[in-house]
Amino acid sequence: MSTFSINLSKKRKEKKLTQQQMADKLNIKIRTYQAYEEDRADPDIETFIKINQILGVKAINYWSKSRTPLLNI
């Protein structure tokens, strides 16, 4: 698994959010969100930014070893 998928799952659980709640907040299907956590897909840049906002992390600090593009937001 990539650092992104591991950190995504970990941070979501820390925020006490379900996968369904994350999918709803991102306006995507739950299967799409699950694919991010299971390292079967990467979010597009807009979704990546939304994930960071929802979870309250700065991409440059938290996802640094992922395949996902890095942003400092």
Image (cartoon, rainbow, N blue to C red):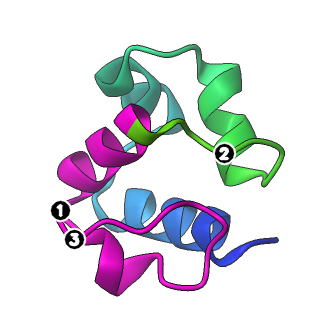
Q: Judge whether residue 30 is colored magenta.
A: no
- Compared across the picture, whether 23 is left or right of 40 comes to left
Provide the residue span drawn in magenta.
46-73
**Residue kind at label 2, given as amino acid type:** Asp
Q: Earlier in the sequence, mark 3 or mark 2?
A: 2
**Camera-side residue of 41 and 14:** 41
**Residue kind at label 1, given as amino acid type:** Gly
Query: Separation of disc 2 and disc 1 at Cα?
Result: 19 Å
Label 3 secondary element: loop
Q: CB atoms at circles 2 and 1 under 8 Å apart?
A: no
- Compared across the picture, whether 32 is left or right of 7 comes to right
Residue that label 1 marks: 56
Q: Judge whether residue 62 is colored magenta.
A: yes
Residue 73 on image: x %, y % = 16, 63
Residue that label 3 marks: 72
Q: Quadrant of the N terminus?
A: bottom right
Q: CB atoms at circles 3 and 2 under 8 Å apart?
A: no
Q: Residue at x 59, y 84 (%)?
A: 65
**Camera-side residue of 37 and 49:** 49
Label 2 secondary element: loop
Residue that label 2 marks: 42
Question: Viewer-nearest of labels 2 and 1?
Answer: 2
Instruction: Say few, some or many: other residues with alpha carbon within 10 Å of mark 1 (under 14 / 14 to 19 / 20 or more).
Output: few
- Work out whether 4 lies above or below 40: below
Q: Place residue 56 in its image quadrant.
A: bottom left
Q: Earlier in the sequence, mark 3 or mark 1?
A: 1
Residue 50 on image: x %, y % = 28, 40
Q: Residue at x 56, y 40 (%)?
A: 43
Q: Residue at x 64, y 78 (%)?
A: 3
- Work out whether 48 lies above or below 56: above
